[in-house]
Image (cartoon, rainbow, N blue to C red):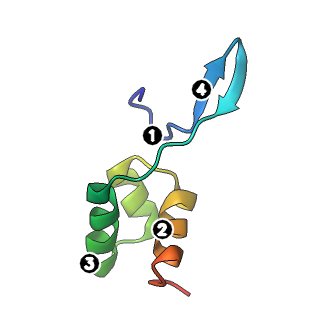
Amino acid sequence: MTGTMFNDQEKHKGVLVMSYHHLTLDERESILVLHSRHLTIRNITLRLKRSPSTISRELRRLSVIG
């Protein structure tokens, strides 16, 4: 990972391509804890350096949000 906020793009042979990294168990737990503390998806995003769609999908997957 490069340390940028969103690590879902990389260059491959000069072309920008998407790359995907699975959430770790620690990240999944952090998402649930932070959400239970009423942090917004945007705030969770900033803390974990993950995209808002990743956080939203994880919460939806766990049926925490509608």
Q: Residues within 10 Å of mark 3 (few under 14, many from 20)?
A: few
Circle 1 residue? 5
Circle 3 residue? 37
Residue under the image location 44 percent in, 32 percent down: 4
Determine the secondary structure under disc 1: loop
Query: The N terminus appears in which quarter of the rendering?
Result: top left
Q: Kindly indicate whether the residue at mark 4 contacts the one at mark 2 (C-beta within 8 angstroms).
A: no
Q: Kindly indicate whether the residue at mark 3 contacts the one at mark 2 (C-beta within 8 angstroms).
A: no
Residue 53 on image: x %, y %? 57, 60
Using the numbered discs, state the Cα–Cα distance from disc 1 to disc 3 in whole angstroms: 22 Å
Determine the secondary structure under disc 2: helix
Q: Kindly indicate whether the residue at mark 4 contacts the one at mark 3 (C-beta within 8 angstroms).
A: no
Q: Earlier in the sequence, mark 3 or mark 4?
A: 4
Circle 4 residue? 10
- Above or below, 50 against 8 in this view is below
Q: Earlier in the sequence, mark 1 or mark 3?
A: 1
Type of residue at label 1?
Met
Q: Kindly indicate whether the residue at mark 1 contacts the one at mark 2 (C-beta within 8 angstroms).
A: no
Type of residue at label 3?
Arg
Q: Kindly indicate whether the residue at mark 1 contacts the one at mark 4 (C-beta within 8 angstroms).
A: no
Determine the secondary structure under disc 3: loop
